[in-house]
Image: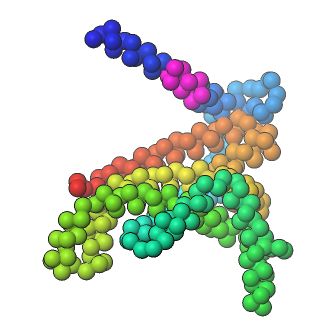
Amino acid sequence: MQSKNRTINLFYVPALVLFAFFVVYPFVKGIYLSMTNWNGYSRSFKIIGLANYKNLFADKNVRRAFVNTLIYGAGSTVIQNILGILLAVFLNQKFRGRGFVRTVIYLPVMIAPLIMGYIMYFFFNYSRGALNDILKILSLAPVDWLADGNRSVWILTLVNSLQFVGISMVIYLAGLQNIPGMYYEAAAIDGINSSQKFFCITLPLLMPAITSAVTLNLIGGLKLYDVIIALTGGGPGYDTNSLSTLIYRYYFGGERAGYASAIGLVMFVFIMIVSNIVVRGLQKRQVEL
């Protein structure tokens, strides 16, 4: 048996080598670079210790990007999960065309976020945008939707949420179909109404699905990148940057690779802590079927 176990363990070696090469080494290298003043191109650079991390707290662009990242993460999570549950409850019923509606809602997930951003750009564009064309038809003045940073942040959150709401819908559909019908039959006998069934039976028994959906949505929102690059480019100015896009702008545009590495490491630790807290909190609320 010991010989057989040793043979089986050998099959882990290729996976461990790939993990070390593509994950562990870049991570360790990133920690090292975050303590340097490397510009991303030069062969020579100096080790400056924790100076990059100290500068993070004084950088107004980092503070703005951090707040935006929280909005993208929390906003996308709330919108996707509320719409996901509502759509799943509706599409869990039997009616003609149910499969077609499910497909239509899920289709945006299959579009690359970068492409979705470009599509939405022509929707919100001031001069030739579809939304302003509709306003002109209604004899209303056009609006420069992306000129204001605060409004653009919420537009980006909405675009990201609507694109990936299909993932939440599928997760909740699977959760609904795993709830035994006997609970609803017993509730009907006791005379419980529809809202009571939802909040007392459906929602508590959906907690495993909620945990999965919230975790995926939260992590996706906190590392939002593609849609921002395509729709606003982080502008106007630095007003709509997330931490991910700020890393890109500092690394390539500002030639501050060491500083960008420090931001990336802080972002990684932040997302890891937040996601773990959320997962543990939701798991405590799960109930056994």
The residues colored magenta run 14-24
Q: Is residue 250 left or right of residue 98?
A: right
Q: Is residue 63 left or right of residue 220?
A: right
Which residue is at 30% across, 71% downward?
199
Query: In terms of depth relative to the viewer, which is nearer, 152 or 56?
Result: 152
Quarter of the view holding residue 29: top right
Quarter of the view holding residue 175: bottom left
Query: In terms of depth relative to the viewer, which is nearer, 153 or 189?
Result: 189
- Percent x, y of residue 70: 55, 58
- Percent x, y of residue 191: 18, 80
Quarter of the view holding residue 96: bottom left
- Percent x, y of residue 224: 62, 53
Q: Is residue 208 left or right of residue 136?
A: left
Where 26 sits versus 278, above or below?
above
- Residue 76 visible somewhere in the drawing: no
Q: How many marks?
A: 0
Q: Which quadrant does the N terminus fall into?
A: top left
Where 79 sits versus 192, above or below?
above
The answer to whether residue 11 is magenta is no
- Residue 138 visible somewhere in the drawing: yes
Which residue is at 60% across, 67% downward?
158
Where 43 sits versus 146, above or below?
above
Colour pattern of the rendering: rainbow
Which residue is at 28% across, 60% downward?
179
Q: Which quadrant does the C terminus fall into?
A: bottom left
Which residue is at 24% across, 61% downward?
180
Q: Main secondary structure of the magenta part?
A: helix
Q: Is residue 206 left or right of residue 168?
A: left
- Percent x, y of residue 263: 64, 42
- Residue, far right: 127
Query: In terms of depth relative to the viewer, which is nearer, 60 or 247?
Result: 247
- Residue, far top: 3
